Amino acid sequence: MNKDQVIQALAPVAPPAAIRNAAVREGTVSLRLDAPTDRGDYDRFAMAAARAVANAAARAEQRIDSITVELADADARVVHGVTFPPARPPEPGHRPIQGLRNQSAQLQTNSLPGVRHAIAVGAGKGGVGKSTIAVNLAVGLARRGHAAGLMDGDIYGPSIPTMLGLEPLEPVVLRGMLQPFYVHGVKAMTIGKLVDPEKPLIWRGPMAHGAFKQLVEQTEWGNLDHLVIDLPPGTGDVPLTLAQLVRLTGAVIVCTPQRVAQDDAVRAARMFQQLGVEILGVVENMSYFVGDDGKEYDLFGRGGAEKMAARLAVPFLGAVPITMALRENSDAGNPTANFEDPERRASEHVRRAADALAGALENLVSNLQSQLSLAAVRQGATRPTLKIT
Ligand code: ADP
């Protein structure tokens, strides 16, 4: 790209008069722009300018390694500066998606080289049990002998500290890197341990991007077979950041059976598809209620999420019942108990509910593993081997 192209690309964001400097050198774009009047707009404005340039470069099939945006006040003093991360050309086999391709391709990098499968867990809305499912998938994978991690990327409402019982633990930094906690056989990190738990977490777009990026890049994850990433609900900035930073094997969508939940889940699924992330499958949580008497009650319209998965032509990973035990074990920070041998439980009734839960979770983990293997083959990471004996 040359300077004129950069100025042209900036037109929707900053008129030529507001561009104090625009330089392009060996793949590095440096911009100095008039700062917006409101300080609160600095980050958003700088991000918009960088995106405009990145998109134009991608359209012109020009490679850019980094974009620095400086904002200057009326006296030409630089009052704010942001550098956007080095870009990498799209992965071979990466299927560009119209409209979003430019952004994600330009800023894409794989920040987790030691992780074989990064699995995002998303949901259309809050309260459907997304974090609960993320925790139990990670614990279930670890119980099968895999090196598993869990990243609490739900930066607006982290619940993993409670669900994994991390409250008494303090984060440790070694060699400048956060050391994940090791609990229930899983390496875990959460923003919930890095901020005041009582304070509301209000992140504006760029801050959310930064906080999430830190969790990914400044945690010493080491080598993992699976890293389960619990995302905030909905379709905000964080999934976009994630898709830019990490080469995901795919995403799991958690949904409850009701129609209203499905509509939101469809939007979440579409978002991943637009970001070029494969949907590994849909989980129907709170599918039905199992009382301690072992009886099953269809509260919310069991099978709704399964039908939605069929409609979207994505795999269905399984249904998880509502049980008292799952809620209690989550609140007590003891997910291991969800998988434990229900034979050890006191009464026949409680045993049946626990049995239903453990069976459902095992089934879920097993189906996820199958989908991961298929996705890895489809994405060219693994070749199928045929053994003839
Ligand atoms: P989300 O991450 O979607 O906001 P959570 O995983 O935090 O939802 O779950 C919300 C609440 O519902 C938690 O108290 C959790 O223990 C409870 N919960 C989730 N799934 C189940 C279930 N299948 N049975 C019983 N309680 C559940």
Image (tube, rainbow, N blue to C red):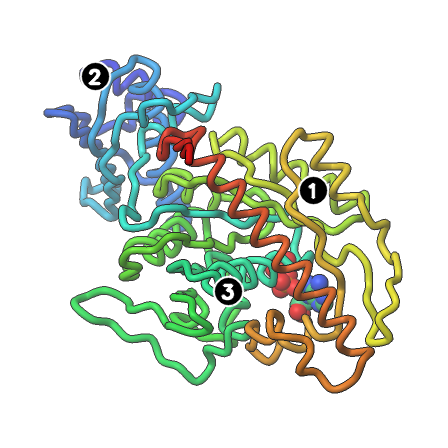
Q: Position of residue 160 (x, y in %)?
A: 51, 68
Dividing the image into four quarters, tell me where ligand 1 lies: bottom right
Quadrant in which the N terminus is drawn: top left
Q: Earlier in the sequence, mark 1 or mark 2?
A: 2
Q: Label 3 crowding class (10 Å Cα cut-off): few <14, some 14-19, many 20+?
A: many
Residue assigned mark 3: 139
Q: Please give the name of the residue rendered at 82% of the width and 78% of the height, measured from the top-left corner.
A: 349
Q: Is residue 339 left or right of residue 208?
A: right
Badge 3 element? helix
> Would you say the residues marked 1 and 2 are in contact, meaning their CB atoms lie under 8 Å apart?
no
Q: Is mark 2 within 8 Å of ligand 1?
A: no
Element under disc 2: loop
Q: Which residue appears farthest toward the front when viewing the image?
A: 389
Residue that label 2 marks: 1
The answer to whether residue 159 is left or right of residue 111 is right
The crowding category of the residue bearing disc 1, from other C-alpha atoms within 10 Å (few below 14, some 14 to 19, many at least 20), is some
N-terminal-most mark, 3 or 1: 3
Residue drawn at 72 percent across, 52 percent down: 319
Q: Quadrant of residue 107?
A: top left
Location of residue 359 with respect to 325 vertically, above or below: above
What kind of residue is marked 3? Val
**Camera-side residue: 203 or 233?**
233
